[in-house]
């Protein structure tokens, strides 16, 4: 059985961070389900890639690179995010999680539900505005 080293764990997390950066910094906002659907995998698998829990195989890495219009080298570049942000700041999407705390029972933390679903976010925004 192969044991994960600190370096391999860091490498996988860096790939995940690059994937998440690419997905979140697209206009319009791109949910994990969109990426997953185009690759024929589940949004849970995309989430596992982004969090560094799973490592994409070479084939999947190539699919992801093609989907985002980058090279495989970009996905494995530790400084990709820094090189591609203005003044080293990630784009702010203006999502305030505290605003949705009352709905935590419907979307438990880590479920990937509310914060990645623009329709649900708009629905709850409307509910909160009516109060």
Image: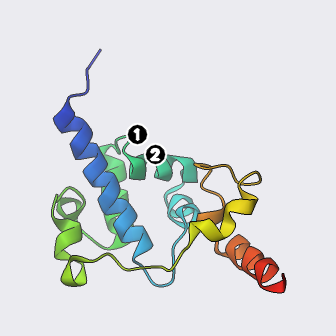
Q: Which residue is mark 1?
A: 53
Colouring:
rainbow
Q: Is residue 34 above or below residue 46?
A: below
Q: Is residue 42 in view?
A: no
Task: Say which mark, if any, is on residue 15.
Answer: none
Nearer-the-camera pick, 105 or 77: 105
| Residue 47 position within the rendered picture, expressed as x and y whole percent measured from the top left | 49, 51
Q: Work out how far the residue at label 2 is from the one at label 1, CA to CA, in angstroms.
A: 5 Å
Q: Is residue 69 left or right of residue 102?
A: left
> Residue at 33% of width from left, 43% of height from top?
57
> Residue at 39% of width from left, 62% of height from top?
20
Q: Is residue 59 left or right of residue 43?
A: left
> Residue at 16% of width from left, 74% of height from top?
83
Q: Secondary structure at mark 1?
A: loop
| Residue 93 position within the rendered picture, expressed as x and y whole percent measured from the top left | 47, 79
In what quadrant of the picture does the N terminus appear? top left
Q: Is residue 15 left or right of residue 105?
A: left
| Residue 55 position within the rendered picture, expressed as x and y whole percent measured from the top left | 34, 41
Nearer-the-camera pick, 89 or 81: 89
Q: Which residue is mark 2?
A: 48
Q: Secondary structure at mark 2?
A: helix
Nearer-the-camera pick, 119 or 89: 89
Q: Is residue 73 in view?
A: yes
| Residue 12 position within the rendered picture, expressed as x and y whole percent measured from the top left | 28, 44
Q: Is residue 52 above or below residue 26?
A: above
In what quadrant of the picture does the C terminus appear? bottom right
Q: Is residue 31 above or below residue 5?
A: below
Task: Tell me, yes or no, whether the two marked residues, 2 and 1, touch with CB atoms within 8 Å.
Answer: yes
For this orientation, the residue located farthest to the right is 130
Q: How many tags in the picture?
A: 2
């Amino acid at each position: 059985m192969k044991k994960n080293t600190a370096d391999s764990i860091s490498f996988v997390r860096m790939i995940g961070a690059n994937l998440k950066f690419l997905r979140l910094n697209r206009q319009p906002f791109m949910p994990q389900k969109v990426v997953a659907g185009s690759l024929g995998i589940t949004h849970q698998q995309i989430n596992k890639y982004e969090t560094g829990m799973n490592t994409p195989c070479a084939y999947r890495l190539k699919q992801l690179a093609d989907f985002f219009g980058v090279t495989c080298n970009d996905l494995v570049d530790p400084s990709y995010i820094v090189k591609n942000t203005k003044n080293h700041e990630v784009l702010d999407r203006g999502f305030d999680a505290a605003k949705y705390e009352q709905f935590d029972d419907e979307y438990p933390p880590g479920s990937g539900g509310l914060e990645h679903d623009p329709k649900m976010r708009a629905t709850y925004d409307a509910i909160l505005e009516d109060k």
